[in-house]
Image (tube, rainbow, N blue to C red):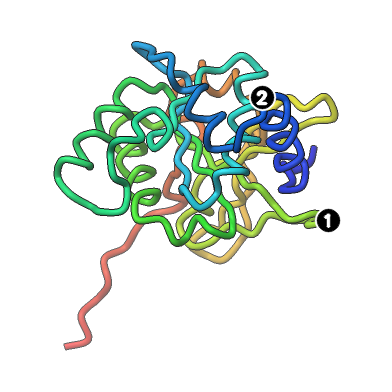
């Protein structure tokens, strides 16, 4: 198992764009021209990563998945502002998607929308996973903050997607490795959403008053 590398998805994006004589963003716009009643994947990402998004989009579509990318499918909707109308549009898009993949890159933490999308999808639908795209020769994925609560995507030697369960530290500080530790992406999509969702390890105790 290995992680998806930035150089690989950028090379894939370059090949796709070169073959059509377009920019990565133009290719994505053309790909999204066909509207669907439902999508397999809502790809939560930032517009700053157009080239990486194209590479990942191409990878997922090649494996047979339909992918919704909001700023591609609806370029007329401004993503630069947070407003009730924009939120309603994104919420409606997520409603017709079965799973959410959070595209974690160096630019992702600057997005106005991605964390909100992840939280909404987790609370309302459940099938949420992190898709890290790492710099070359990065041996480990060190998820930031609450992203570490969610399963993350790796690929096998044939390029097939697998889900890896995150390591959990229990209330006593002991590392807990739950089983099953991994499963195919398609298998996870077909399973109960609660199987790999964040869970509480040990009893939660209310803080005691100091007064």
> On screen, 48 above or below 155?
below
Q: How many marks?
A: 2
Nearer to us: label 2 or label 1 = 2
Residue 122: image location, x then y, percent: 36, 38
Element class at badge 2: helix
Residue 178: image location, x then y, percent: 61, 41
Classed neighbour count for the residue bearing mark 2: other residues with Cα under 10 Å, few (<14), some (14–19), many (≥20):
few
**Residue sitting nearer the eye, 64 or 208:** 64
For residue 123, side relative to residue 165 (left or right): left
Element class at badge 1: loop
Classed neighbour count for the residue bearing mark 1: other residues with Cα under 10 Å, few (<14), some (14–19), many (≥20):
few
Check residue 13 in the rendering and tell me which mark sits there, or answer none: none
Residue 65: image location, x then y, percent: 56, 17
Q: What residue did someone put label 2 on? A: 20
> On screen, 126 above or below 209?
above
Toward the top, the furthest residue is: 37
Q: Quarter of the image for the C terminus: give it.
A: bottom left
Q: Give the Cα distance between marks 2 and 1.
A: 30 Å
For residue 104, side relative to residue 84 (left or right): right
For residue 65, side relative to residue 164 (left or right): left
Residue under the point 30% across and 40% down: 120
Residue 5: image location, x then y, percent: 74, 46
Q: What residue did someone put label 1 on? A: 137
Is tag 2's residue or tag 1's residue first in the polypeptide sequence? 2
Query: Do callouts 2 and 1 mark residues in contact (Cβ within 8 Å)?
Result: no
Specify the quadrant of the image occupied by residue 14. top right
Specify the quadrant of the image occupied by residue 12. top right
Residue under the point 28% across and 32% down: 124
């Amino acid at each position: 198992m290995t992680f998806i590398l930035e150089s690989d998805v950028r090379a894939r994006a370059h090949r796709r764009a070169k073959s059509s004589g377009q920019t990565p963003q133009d290719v994505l716009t053309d790909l999204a021209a066909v509207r669907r009643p439902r999508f397999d994947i809502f790809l939560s990402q930032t517009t700053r990563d157009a080239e990486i998004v194209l590479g990942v989009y191409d990878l997922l579509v090649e494996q047979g998945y339909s992918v919704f990318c909001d700023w591609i499918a609806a370029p007329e909707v401004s993503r630069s502002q947070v407003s009730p109308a924009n939120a309603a549009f994104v919420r409606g898009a997520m409603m017709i998607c079965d799973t959410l993949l959070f595209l974690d890159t160096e630019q992702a933490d600057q997005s106005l929308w991605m964390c909100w999308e992840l939280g909404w999808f987790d609370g309302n639908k459940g099938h949420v996973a992190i898709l890290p795209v790492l710099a070359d020769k990065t041996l480990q994925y060190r998820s930031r903050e609450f992203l570490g609560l969610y399963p993350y995507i790796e690929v096998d030697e044939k390029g097939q997607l697998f889900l890896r369960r995150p390591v959990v530290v229990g209330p006593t500080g002991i590392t807990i490795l739950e089983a099953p530790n991994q499963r195919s992406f398609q298998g996870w999509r077909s399973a109960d959403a609660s199987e790999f969702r964040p869970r509480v390890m040990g009893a939660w105790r209310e803080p005691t008053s100091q007064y």
